[in-house]
Image (tube, coloured by chain):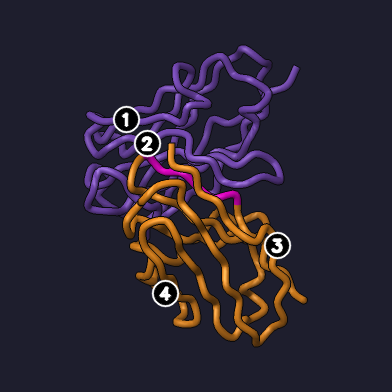
Chain colours: A purple, B orange
Amino acid sequence: EVQLVESGGSAVRPGGSLRLSCAASGFMFDDYGMSWVRQAPGKGLEWVSGINWNGGSTGYADSVKGRFTISRDNAKNSLYLQMNSLRAEDTALYYCARGYGSGSFYHFDYWGQGSLVTVSS
Amino acid sequence: EIVMTQSPATLSVSPGERATLSCRASQNVGSNLAWYQQKPGQAPRLLIYGASIRATAIPGRFSGSGSGTEFTLTINILQSEDFAVYYCQQYNSWPTFGQGTRLEIK
């Protein structure tokens, strides 16, 4: 059974940093691209960042470019999101999602349950 | 960035009827379009990918169509469990989502 379990979310002050983790199991982690998708309270889905199977290609939404860094450790079946210079508008539930598709970009066939990040003074 | 626009924002339909949801891309995305369903307190669930391919275990009453810039999700014979928020997502480039359509009971 495919499982994605996020952790690391918490309350942080503006300008602070957090590192989210996603532990994957039930599939060959290094066969898949992965992404982080967030959802602000009461709002829609926003893709945040994605990484290909070996970490050689990454992408970021304009809203987080230069502040967030995605990475993965295939030996540990884990995905990470380092978030720096956090702003109030980064407050959201952050989902880890598995990418599926034969091309460079993909849709998401499995999602975790999310990790809540709250940025507030 | 490819902008995805969904319409309507809210759709009111009676159980047993058909719902038609629309999604428009700001540029050609081919068939690289997915649809998701999200219920309160739950993660999104993949319904359709490749514009028209049902994901695993998705009932046949869900169907997708379209290509290029215009896409449609149709739900036939609405069941009570179908009332939720629906999102489209393009993956012709780095992904972007539509703002969602809330399907509510009429």
Residues at marks 2 and 3 on the same chain: no
Q: Distance between the residues labelled 4 and 1?
A: 31 Å
Q: Tell me: A22 left or right of B38.
A: left
Type of amino acid at the residue the image marks with label 1: Thr
Which image quarter: residue A11? top right
Q: Which mark is drawn over residue A50?
A: 2
Q: Is mark 2 on a helix, strand or loop?
A: strand
User: Viewer-nearest of labels 2 and 3?
Assistant: 3
Q: In the picture, which quadrant includes the N terminus of chain A?
A: bottom left
Type of amino acid at the residue the image marks with label 3: Thr
Q: Mark 4 points at which residue?
A: B57
Mark 1 or mark 2: name the one nearer the start of the chain: 2
Q: Is mark 1 on a helix, strand or loop?
A: strand
Which image quarter: residue A104? top left
Q: How far apart are marks 4 and 3 (CA)?
A: 26 Å
Q: Which mark is drawn over residue A58?
A: 1
Q: Which chain carries label 2?
A: A
Span shown in magenta: B94-99
- Residue A72 coordinates in the image, percent (x, y): 32, 31
Residue located at (47% from left, 61% from top) = B35
Residues at marks 4 and 1 on the same chain: no
